[in-house]
């Protein structure tokens, strides 16, 4: 049995200040069919653990509680608002003396990865709904039940939990990074000029994100938090692209929390069609945008339009008809696909048994890899779970040192996997080699990958 979600809880103890009102503190509990007494007991146990651990530390008093069967993760995104996610450890059913028993593999569950998944679930809520506190009236008493907040949380997380795929989460969830399609210099300039032309011609379009074959090609989002860009990318894959696969539609599309296809003849007169509002946070400021998604064949472009702009038929005609965005987008997409096909010739690096690499830039929140990952198969079949967990541990050890430094580590596992970890100037490069070899040969193999994929990044 693989890893699975046991429960997902959001609560605030301030909403219950006397005995008998314990249910008021519950803002969300999944699964919803759990009886109220069990919900209250589970939250009471969480509160006791937090209170106990809080006597020893002030910040992040408790992050994870492990048992043989479960891993419980804690996160406080806003003061007094706690999010708890409990996951069932994977196990194998075995038999001994004609008696069946479960052998749990809790060591395969990396708590750092799944705590990042919990944090991402909050960032997704904040992106589309704002903060928890923003849904509580300023004059509302702390003991009053915040019905607006409860309804907003329920509407969002009931759908969001359905998109969670815990069995494929890995180190990339910790990165919160976005992988961009590699382009040559000429094509890179062509794409950026196209995006800048849109923004110059239509000042209402503040930011653009271009996808091709479901990969980010260009993101003109200079003042957008990289983690919010990651959330937009996650939304597009978990919701938008997933529903496109189900519908197999080739129409131009708008997203409004769920996929809504708009034909060119859509009537915009009268009440305008509602598009989702997203909240972009930078330091202590928040700015709201309308998220408009236009799809044409293999290309998808997201427009972040200022919230105050009224989306009318005239604006859409100007953007999609007179500006001929579809024609230009088709030409650029064809060039991108041809370039990707020319670059996809088989090499030893791309084979199942060849060396693999992961490159992550902390400053730009961008990554690249050769693990042949995608959003439908997020965990590579050719790299064992324990190797991915070891890479995660090496990365966590690096980021605990806040000072920029240059270092290299080499680790060998019992099943002949070599991991070479190199860090310099907030860049991390991991090389994975599976073969029985000497350290000198592995070092040369890693150096070859450095020179190919990370030239001018690391010190000699």
Image (cartoon, grey):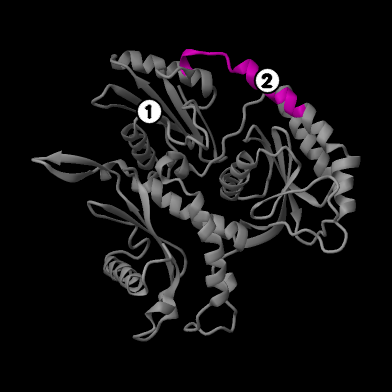
Q: Residue furthest left?
A: 97
* For marks 2 and 1 on the same chain, the one whose residue lies earlier in the sequence: 2
- Please give the residue where the numbered disc 2 appears in the rendered image: 339
Prevalent SS, magenta region: helix
Residue 460 at x, y percent in the picture: 45, 21
Q: Does residue 339 show up magenta in the picture?
A: yes
* Crowding at mark 1 (Cα within 10 Å: few <14, some 14-19, many 20+): some
Q: How many marks?
A: 2
Q: Is residue 168 left or right of residue 345?
A: left
Q: Is residue 327 left or right of residue 437?
A: right
Position of 159 relative to 136 (above/below): above
Q: What separation in Å lies between label 2 and label 1 (alpha carbons)?
A: 28 Å
Residue located at (33% from left, 63% from top): 61
Q: Residue furthest front?
A: 98
Position of 108 relative to 52 (above/below): above
Residue located at (71% from left, 28% from top): 188
Q: Secondary structure at mark 1?
A: loop
Q: Is residue 35 visible?
A: yes
Residue 148 at x, y percent in the picture: 58, 74
Position of 354 relative to 88 (above/below): above
In magenta, the rendered stretch is 332-349
Residue 157 at x, y percent in the picture: 51, 60
Between 49 and 109, the one lying in front of the other is 109
- Please give the residue where the numbered disc 1 appears in the rendered image: 383
């Amino acid at each position: 049995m693989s890893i699975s979600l046991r429960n997902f809880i959001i609560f605030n103890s301030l909403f219950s200040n006397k005995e008998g009102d314990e249910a008021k503190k519950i803002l969300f509990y999944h699964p919803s069919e759990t009886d109220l007494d069990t919900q209250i007991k589970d939250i009471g146990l969480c509160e006791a653990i937090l209170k106990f651990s809080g006597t020893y530390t002030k910040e992040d008093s408790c992050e994870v509680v492990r048992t043989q069967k479960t891993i419980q993760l804690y996160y406080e995104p806003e003061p007094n608002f706690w999010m708890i996610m409990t996951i069932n450890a994977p196990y194998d059913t075995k038999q001994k003396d004609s008696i069946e028993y479960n052998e749990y593999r809790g060591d395969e569950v990396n708590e750092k990865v799944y705590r990042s998944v919990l944090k991402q679930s909050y960032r997704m809520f904040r992106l589309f709904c704002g903060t928890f506190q923003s849904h509580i009236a300023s004059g509302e008493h702390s003991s009053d039940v915040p019905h607006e907040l409860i309804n907003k949380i329920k509407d969002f997380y009931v759908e969001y939990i359905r998109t969670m795929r815990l069995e494929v989460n890995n180190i990339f969830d910790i990165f919160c990074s976005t992988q961009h399609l590699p382009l040559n210099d000429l094509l890179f300039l062509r794409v950026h000029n196209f995006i800048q032309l849109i923004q110059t011609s239509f000042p209402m379009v503040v930011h653009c994100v271009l996808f091709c074959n479901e990969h980010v090609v260009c993101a003109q989002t200079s003042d957008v938090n990289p983690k919010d860009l990651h959330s937009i990318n996650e939304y597009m894959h978990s919701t938008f692209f997933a529903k496109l696969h189900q519908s197999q539609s080739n129409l131009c599309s708008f997203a409004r929390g769920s996929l809504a296809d708009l034909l060119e003849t859509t009537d915009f007169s009268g009440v305008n069609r509602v598009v989702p509002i997203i909240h972009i946070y930078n330091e202590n400021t928040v700015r709201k945008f309308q998220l408009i998604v236009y799809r044409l064949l293999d290309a998808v472009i997201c427009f972040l339009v200022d919230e105050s702009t009224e989306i009318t038929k005239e604006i859409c005609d100007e953007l999609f008809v007179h500006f001929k965005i579809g024609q230009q987008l088709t030409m650029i997409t064809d060039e991108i696909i041809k370039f990707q096909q020319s670059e996809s010739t088989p090499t030893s690096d791309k084979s199942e048994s060849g060396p693999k690499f992961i490159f992550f830039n902390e400053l730009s929140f961008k990554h690249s890899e050769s693990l042949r990952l995608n959003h439908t198969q997020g965990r590579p079949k050719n790299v064992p779970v324990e190797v991915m967990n070891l890479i995660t541990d090496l990365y966590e050890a690096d980021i605990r040192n806040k000072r920029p430094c240059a270092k290299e580590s080499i680790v060998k596992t019992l099943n002949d996997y070599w991991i070479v970890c190199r860090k310099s100037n907030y860049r991390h490069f991991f090389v994975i080699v599976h073969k029985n070899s000497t350290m000198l040969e592995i070092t040369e193999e890693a150096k070859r990958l450095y020179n190919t994929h990370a030239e001018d990044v690391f010190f000699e």
